Image (tube, rainbow, N blue to C red):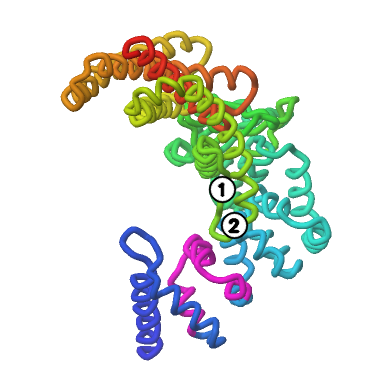
């Protein structure tokens, strides 16, 4: 008996040592540990691989997959049991997940999906090719298959696709004691994680909710209808961004999802919303730069196809802005210093426009900017642009005068800078507002238009003022 206890202690110590080796203090993978996993895969050392993987959680194994080659990932899959495989698949980057799903047998994948929440399982099935999707669904129990098929019937990026169908509900005439006793008897049918018990009427429409923390504190004889709180219902067709906004506004942990008639069909929990917020934030950041997500396994030509169109549009707008320079070709020839200074005016205007644009896009996404306060916001940004432009005009004008001893040149440069920063701030606020009003995503194309405005204005203002004042 003592020998078995010593062996258990040795295994625990080994896992703790490997866990310390695997991850740095910031939870990033240690390159040495990744090499150890790759070496174990190359040697086909199943025992060593079991030890290495045993030190990791599912989230860490999913992260590890991104550092392994496609062949190594395929070799690793048979070493994951269905429950762990389901957890790992749920955490994978989309590109890597698609690659891995191609190499998992339909029966194995069906078992893994059975260990996942219905919303996560539906997301995985939706990524499968039609032939394999049919094979996997056919291998699943009828109840689980029906739940996934029902979820997939809802439109993508809606509450129906986001929700999990597993909920904890109780009739409003039950007491606390009845509810707790029922949940203990039916523990196998409860969701793995839940925060609220939804109180429903005879038509299965939610009339309130009892947080688990309140349920455990209440007297057993207390009626649920007496201790329940109001609920914020989420329509099944609501866009996931709207759902995230509601969760943020009302500080929700979970919320019931209802059909048009008000019947409870599922719930959205805060862990789902965290994923939505992160996904939407990444999309907005990438769209603001005119690019799409390039994951660790993204192909070169796919990245080129996503970025090249915006570069071509930017080339056209840059050419239009540059056409202003040609109109002042004679002035530039007479005073070559104009060619050196005009990019500075355009560049500073571009930076000011980008600052305002970033603030406006974020405010639109978080519902802090709307038609109600649009005028106040635009006025504020115009004032900021004018003040920043005035400060930079004085500073740079003084520096230019110190170098060239030309008051006219300093005046032209300073005024052009003031005008361009004012226009840049105005464009940075108005362009995303206009695109949002037109039903377009302001994060996608705003930067191209704002850059065009600042370049055009900067060149025209500086060269035009220089022609009037100096020549």
Of the numbered discs 1 and 2, the one sitting upstream in the chain is: 1
Magenta highlight on residue 52 = yes
Residue assigned mark 1: 293
**Residue beneath the point at 66% across and 29% down:** 238
Say whether residue 448 is left or right of residue 405.
Answer: right
Magenta stretch mostly in which secondary structure?
A: helix
For residue 401, which quarter of the picture?
A: top left
Question: Residue 267: x and y, percent?
Answer: 62, 38
- Camera-side residue: 203 or 85? 85
Say whether residue 109 is left or right of residue 184.
Answer: right
Q: Looking at the rendering, in which quadrant would you find the N terminus? A: bottom left
For residue 224, which quarter of the picture?
A: top right
Residue 298's disc is 2
User: Looking at the image, can residue 151 be seen?
Assistant: yes
Question: From the viewer's perspective, is residue 385 above or below residue 219?
Answer: above
- CA distance separating discs 1 and 2: 9 Å
**Residue beneath the point at 18% across and 21% down:** 405
Say whether residue 233 is left or right of residue 210.
Answer: right
- The magenta region covers 48-74
Q: What element carries label 2?
A: loop
Question: Residue 438: x and y, percent?
Answer: 64, 19
User: Looking at the image, can residue 177 be seen?
Assistant: no
């Amino acid at each position: 008996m003592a020998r078995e206890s010593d062996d258990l202690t040795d295994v625990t110590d080994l896992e703790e040592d490997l866990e310390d080796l695997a991850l740095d203090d910031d939870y990033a993978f240690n390159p040495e540990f990744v090499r150890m996993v790759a070496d174990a895969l190359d040697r086909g050392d199943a025992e060593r691989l079991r030890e290495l993987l045993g030190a990791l959680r599912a989230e860490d194994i999913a992260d590890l997959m991104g550092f392994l080659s496609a062949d190594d990932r395929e070799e690793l899959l048979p070493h994951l049991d269905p429950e762990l495989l389901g957890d790992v698949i749920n955490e994978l980057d989309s590109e890597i997940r698609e690659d891995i799903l191609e190499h998992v047998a339909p029966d194995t994948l069906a078992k893994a999906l059975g260990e996942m929440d219905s919303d996560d399982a539906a997301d995985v099935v939706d990524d499968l090719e039609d032939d394999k999707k049919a094979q996997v669904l056919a291998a699943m129990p009828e109840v689980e298959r029906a739940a996934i098929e029902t979820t997939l019937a809802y439109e993508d990026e809606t509450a129906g696709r986001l929700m999990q169908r597993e909920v904890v509900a109780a009739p409003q005439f039950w007491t606390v004691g009845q509810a707790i006793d029922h949940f203990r008897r039916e523990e196998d049918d409860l969701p793995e994680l839940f925060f609220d018990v939804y109180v429903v009427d005879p038509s299965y429409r939610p009339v309130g909710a009892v947080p688990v923390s309140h349920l455990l504190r209440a007297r057993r004889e207390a009626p649920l209808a007496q201790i329940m709180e109001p609920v914020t219902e989420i329509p099944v067709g609501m866009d996931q961004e709207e759902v995230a906004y509601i969760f943020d506004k009302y500080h929700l942990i979970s919320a019931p999802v209802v059909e048009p008639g008000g019947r409870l069909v599922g719930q959205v929990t805060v862990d789902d919303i965290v994923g939505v917020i992160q996904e939407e934030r990444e999309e907005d950041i990438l769209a603001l730069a005119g690019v799409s997500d390039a994951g660790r396994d993204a192909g070169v030509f796919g990245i080129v196809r996503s970025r090249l169109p915006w570069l071509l549009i930017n080339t056209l707008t840059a050419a239009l802005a540059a056409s202003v320079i040609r109109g002042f070709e004679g002035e530039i020839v007479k005073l070559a210093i104009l060619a050196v200074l005009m990019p500075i005016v355009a560049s500073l205007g571009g930076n000011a426009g980008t600052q305002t644009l970033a603030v406006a896009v974020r405010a639109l996404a978080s519902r802090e900017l709307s038609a109600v306060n649009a005028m106040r916001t635009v006025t504020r940004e115009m004032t900021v642009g004018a003040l920043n432009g005035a400060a930079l005009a004085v500073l740079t004008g003084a520096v230019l005068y110190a170098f060239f001893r030309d008051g006219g040149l300093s005046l032209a440069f300073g005024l052009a800078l003031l005008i361009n920063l004012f226009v840049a701030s105005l464009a940075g606020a108005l362009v995303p507002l206009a695109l949002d009003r037109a039903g377009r995503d302001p994060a996608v194309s705003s930067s191209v238009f704002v850059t065009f405005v600042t370049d055009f204005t900067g060149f025209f203002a500086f060269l035009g003022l220089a022609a009037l004042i100096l020549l």
